[in-house]
Image (cartoon, rainbow, N blue to C red):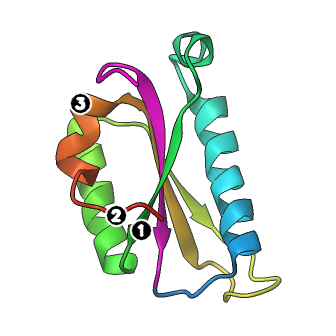
């Protein structure tokens, strides 16, 4: 993967203790909404469609990263759960960022560990 290739990052809250299936579903919601809102969709589709899932500690860390995304004008989407299964209604579960070039977003997500 080149440093300029467009990537979607999926930041999953670890404090919610969601099951693997729940995490996958929440990440899918984020990808779907980012793709629908994306202005560079053709450029993203031409590539390999990379998605990277990362761990974030909690809502506080999510909100700090959202603030940084706004400052940098990165496309992001917050997945808010309907509360039908494992987490209460209106819980922010996953933050999706991108598609964005890896070298531009590194200062925001470079410290995070893979899920």
Residue in the picture at 23% in, 31% down: 104
Q: Residue 27: name its quadrant.
A: bottom right
Q: Earlier in the sequence, mark 3 or mark 2?
A: 3
Q: Residues within 10 Å of mark 3 (few under 14, many from 20)?
A: few
Determine whether the residue tagged by mark 2 lies in a helix, strand or loop. loop
Judging by the rendered image, the residue that carries numbered circle 1 is: 55
Q: Position of residue 29 (x, y in %)?
A: 70, 53
Element class at badge 3 = helix
Residue drawn at the location 67% of the way across and 87% of the way down: 87
Please tell me whether residue 112 is drawn above or below residue 22 in the rendered image.
above
Q: Which residue is mark 2?
A: 113
Mark 2 or 1: the one toward you: 2
- Depth order, front residue of 86/71: 86
**Residue visible at 57% across and 88% down in the picture:** 17
- Compute the Cα span from label 3 to label 2: 17 Å
Q: Which mark is residue 86?
A: none
Q: Mark 2–mark 1 contact, CB under 8 Å? A: yes
The magenta stretch spans which residues?
A: 1-14
């Amino acid at each position: 993967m080149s440093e300029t290739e467009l990537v979607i990052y999926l930041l999953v809250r670890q404090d919610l203790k969601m099951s693997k299936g729940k995490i996958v579903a929440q990440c899918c919601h984020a990808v779907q909404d980012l793709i629908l809102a994306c202005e560079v969709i053709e450029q993203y589709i031409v590539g390999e469609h990379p998605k990277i899932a990362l761990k974030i500690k909690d809502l506080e860390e999510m909100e700090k990263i959202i603030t940084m995304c706004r400052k940098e004008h990165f496309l992001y989407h917050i997945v808010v759960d309907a509360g039908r299964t494992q987490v209460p209604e209106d819980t922010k579960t996953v933050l999706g960022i991108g598609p964005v070039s890896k070298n531009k977003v590194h200062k925001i997500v470079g410290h995070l560990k893979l899920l």
